[in-house]
Image (spheres, rainbow, N blue to C red):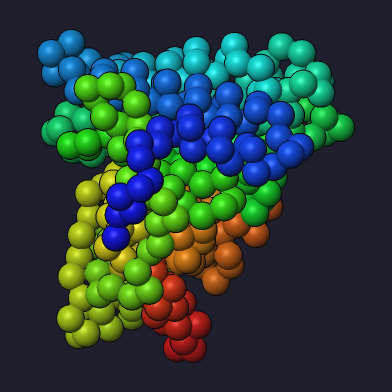
Amino acid sequence: MEDPNRGLITVTSYLLDEERKHPTATGKLTWILSAITLASKYIAARCRRARLEDVLGSIDCENVQGEIQQKLDVIANETLLKCLGNRGGLAIVASEENEEPIILRSSDDPERPYIALFDPLDGSSNIDVCGGVGTIFSILHHDRRAKPLESAVLQPGYRQVAAGYVLYGPSTILVMTTGNGVQMFVLDPSIGSFLLVEPDLKIPKAYKSYSLNEAYIETFPEGYQNYLHWAHQNGYSGRYAGAMVADVHRTLIKGGVFLYPPTKKAPKGKLRLMYEANPMGMLIEQAGGKAFSGLERTLDIQPEGVHDRVSVIMGSTEEVDHVLAHLKEKP
Ligand code: AHG
Ligand code: MN
Ligand code: MN
């Protein structure tokens, strides 16, 4: 139930308020998050005009992971790098679209205590069909003692200090956590501000819905196949947008489970640990749900590389437990 006395809270006023609760806060995290909201407003505007500006489709280029880059992947990446690159507080940025983490100037400067990782445009092939796409981000503390410096990025997800996504759909939605619950904001395009619409968002404990690319069922490990057969017999419905941000957002609001199991083509899973599974996992956990990669909690995984891939099972606690129970079953 909406609190009528809450007034209008912008994302900046929310963050400044949070800062006041932490006497040691320096304001640097707020400054970084405000760069991400600035970039996302620009990306939202470019997505809305994509057809008019002729930035649909792919460019003749693959990213580091051998995936075709869409024109808007490049635009979104450049926008985030531009907005974040000249903000104080950040030592390193890493993106899906860049092979190596980018070390910003004076990275051993104690005035730059953070690292930002992002998937600039998630589900980018959806842009051509006017489907939901998004930006995902993860913020970590920087360890200046790391050698080489780039390896400071390789931290497990439980160390994230903030995480979130922006969904560019019929409205532009920002869902974010700084480790103190999940807050949902909606961009009011008439004033250009993200306004708080749902403080302390919680995921429903159960909902009979699964979200995955079921066309790959024959190549899933047996436990996932058994779970799907069980779900078919137990009144489940399926929903899949093919963009993690859109699918996880629906799962967060309505409940259910989002999965990307290992497949023949992607034996470790397709989704990236550090800028897809970890930030989404932190949000889901902060909202009261669970996030697993096989039988392991996603946020406990020690990354070996910035572009590592993992399998994903995340959503309502009871729904994730149903999947895990099938994975644990002995043949
Ligand atoms: P990206 O566009 O950032 O490369 O991510 C695409 C991902 C993710 O958004 C989605 O969940 C998944 O790819 C869809 O993969 P399938 O087409 O194999 O279902
Ligand atoms: Mn993605
Ligand atoms: Mn992407």
Query: Is residue 310 visible to us here?
Result: no
Residue 221, quarter of the rendered image: bottom left
Q: Is residue 242 left or right of residue 275?
A: left
Query: Is residue 237 visible to us here?
Result: yes
* The N terminus, quarter of image: bottom left
Q: Is residue 288 left or right of residue 246?
A: right
Quick one: 194 or 7, which is closer to the camera?
Answer: 7
Residue 141, quarter of the rendered image: top right
Residue, far front: 5
Q: Is residue 260 above or below residue 153?
A: below
- Residue 248 at what x, y percent from top left? 35, 53
- Residue 183 at what x, y percent from top left? 43, 48
- Residue 222 at what x, y percent from top left? 39, 76
Point 76% across, 37% down: residue: 24
- Residue 149 at what x, y percent from top left? 78, 27
Point 22% across, 36% down: residue: 171
Q: Is residue 230 above or below residue 2?
A: below
Q: Is residue 41 above or below residue 67?
A: above
* The C terminus, quarter of image: bottom left
Point 51% across, 61% down: residue: 285
Q: Is residue 211 above or below residue 226?
A: above
Residue, far right: 145
Q: Is residue 217 left or right of residue 80?
A: left
* Mark count: 0
Point 66% across, 17% down: residue: 88
Quick one: 289 or 11, which is closer to the camera?
Answer: 11
